[in-house]
Image: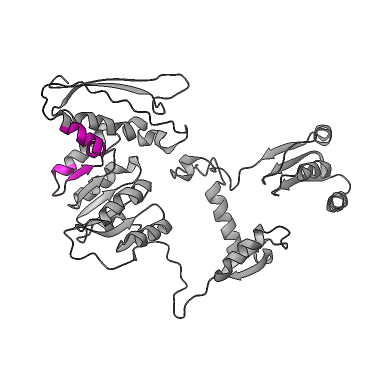
């Protein structure tokens, strides 16, 4: 079949020596591509696997020819590295010439100058209202051969065809007739599932501006929850139209965003933690003292119904208290963003909830802290989940 044709083509092309290298980009559960590569590659040649294929390497060809096998991640260096893909920490060009981003830049540049032509790959075109048929073409058994499928959108008459890549995008009318107008930076799971629905259900709040890491998600969330606009500039949230700013981003950005909002005279609700380091915390305290705005941290355990019931039960008692809080929060993968030292680790990120809960039961400041973590040479202090902390309060609790 086709394999025999490829064997012959490779022999003829290489003057019977075999090709120098094979790049496997197929996606199949079959072992045929790796076997074919071994047959057609010359002695001491290279086989590079990019696609998702079965890799039961046949010893006969690969051993006798001493073939080199390399496996390449898609896109290039940086792929699957959270510090690169999510944290934005680039690899210096002097050490890694073609990273995931620079590979994509090179490809787009080649397309722009006509050195790479993708048009011949397009085998089918569908209008967007036929999208179901387009996906059906790929999923049906015995479907007709296809490579690239294009979905085409109709541009309304007179509409601009220029893509908007940033800046401020108006979504709805400005909120009017409400005492408090809030803007959001960040729109993760907690913000969209808890905070925004709570504000929407209140007649006291109107929603003004929204800024998120992704412009695409910002528009979707803004439309869903009734924001007046979305933006990729934090300063747009600090205008006179906004009374309070909600900060629901990742932990390492909290202190900086809070200080910027306070400097603009805004009230701030910030998800825990307020800061990652003590210098950051001191800077935030100084910023609040110099601002007309105030800060609230999203410690919510003290407002939980069971906590309120406990307050009521203990209201008649007085004196110092012994409080035990045990938390079984489950494990996180070691590469989770919360374990990035820049984010302070899990105790600063989550354990702070329960320190605040203990403080809420005692009307007295903390005077001493004794704490230790499970220690292991294989686990860094930042990534350990298992921590014991003892707090002593001024009243003896």
Residue 25 pos. (x, y %) = 69, 49
Residue 59 pos. (x, y %) = 81, 32
Reply yes or no: does residue 297 show up in magenta: yes
Total residue callouts: 0
**Left or right of residue 283: residue 334:** right
Position of residue 115 relative to residue 345, above or below, is below
* Residue 115 seen from this side: no
Query: 346 or 310: which is nearer to us?
Result: 310
Residue 66 pos. (x, y %) = 79, 33
Residue 133 pos. (x, y %) = 62, 66
* Residue 362 seen from this side: yes
User: Residue drawn 58% across and 45% down?
Assistant: 76
Position of residue 139 relative to residue 75, above or below, is below
Which colour assignment does the render follow?
one colour
Query: 176 or 11: which is nearer to us?
Result: 176
Instruction: Tell me the quarter of the picture where residue 49 sits.
Output: top right
In which quadrant will I find the C terminus?
top left
Position of residue 189 relative to residue 241, above or below, is above
**Left or right of residue 178: residue 335:** right
Residue at the extreme bottom of the image, as rendered: 157
Instruction: Tell me the quarter of the picture where residue 327 sits.
Output: top left
Reply yes or no: does residue 179 show up in magenta: no
Range of residues picked out in magenta: 287-312
Query: 299 or 312: which is nearer to us?
Result: 312
């Amino acid at each position: 079949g086709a394999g025999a044709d490829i064997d012959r083509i490779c022999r003829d092309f290489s003057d019977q020596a075999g090709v120098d290298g094979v790049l496997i980009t197929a996606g199949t559960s079959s072992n045929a591509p790796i076997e074919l590569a071994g047959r057609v590659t010359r002695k001491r040649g290279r086989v590079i696997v990019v696609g998702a294929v079965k890799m039961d390497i046949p010893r006969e060809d690969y051993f006798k020819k001493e073939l080199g096998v390399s496996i390449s991640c898609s896109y290039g260096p940086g792929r699957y590295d959270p510090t690169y893909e999510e944290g934005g920490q680039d690899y210096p060009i002097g050490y890694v010439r073609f990273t995931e981003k620079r590979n994509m830049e090179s490809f787009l540049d080649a397309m722009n100058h006509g050195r790479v032509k993708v048009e011949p790959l397009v085998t089918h075109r569908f209008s967007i209202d036929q999208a179901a048929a387009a996906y059906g073409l790929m999923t049906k058994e015995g479907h007709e051969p296809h490579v690239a499928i294009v979905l085409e959108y109709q541009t309304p008459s007179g509409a601009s065809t220029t893509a908007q890549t940033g800046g401020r995008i108006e979504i709805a009318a400005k909120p009017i007739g409400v005492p408090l107008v809030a803007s959001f930076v960040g729109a993760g799971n907690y913000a969209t599932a808890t905070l925004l629905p709570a504000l929407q259900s209140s007649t006291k709040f109107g929603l003004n501006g929204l800024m998120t890491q992704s412009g695409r998600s910002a528009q979707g969330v803004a439309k869903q929850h009734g924001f007046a606009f979305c933006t990729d500039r934090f300063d747009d949230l600090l205008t006179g139209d906004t009374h309070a700013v909600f900060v629901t981003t990742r932990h390492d950005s909290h202190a900086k965003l809070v200080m910027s909002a306070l400097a603009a005279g805004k009230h701030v609700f910030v998800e825990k933690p307020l800061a990652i380091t003590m210098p950051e915390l001191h800077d935030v305290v100084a910023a609040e003292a110099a601002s007309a705005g105030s800060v609230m941290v999203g410690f919510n355990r003290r407002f939980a119904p069971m906590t309120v019931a406990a307050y009521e039960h203990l209201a008649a008692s007085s004196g110092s208290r012994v409080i035990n809080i045990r938390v079984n929060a489950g494990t996180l993968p070691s590469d989770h963003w919360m374990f990035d030292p820049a984010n302070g680790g899990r105790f600063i990120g989550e354990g702070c909830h329960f320190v605040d809960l203990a403080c809420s039961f005692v009307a007295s400041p903390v005077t001493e802290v004794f704490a230790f973590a499970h220690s292991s040479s294989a686990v860094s202090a930042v990534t350990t989940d298992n921590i014991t902390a003892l707090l002593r309060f001024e009243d003896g609790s």
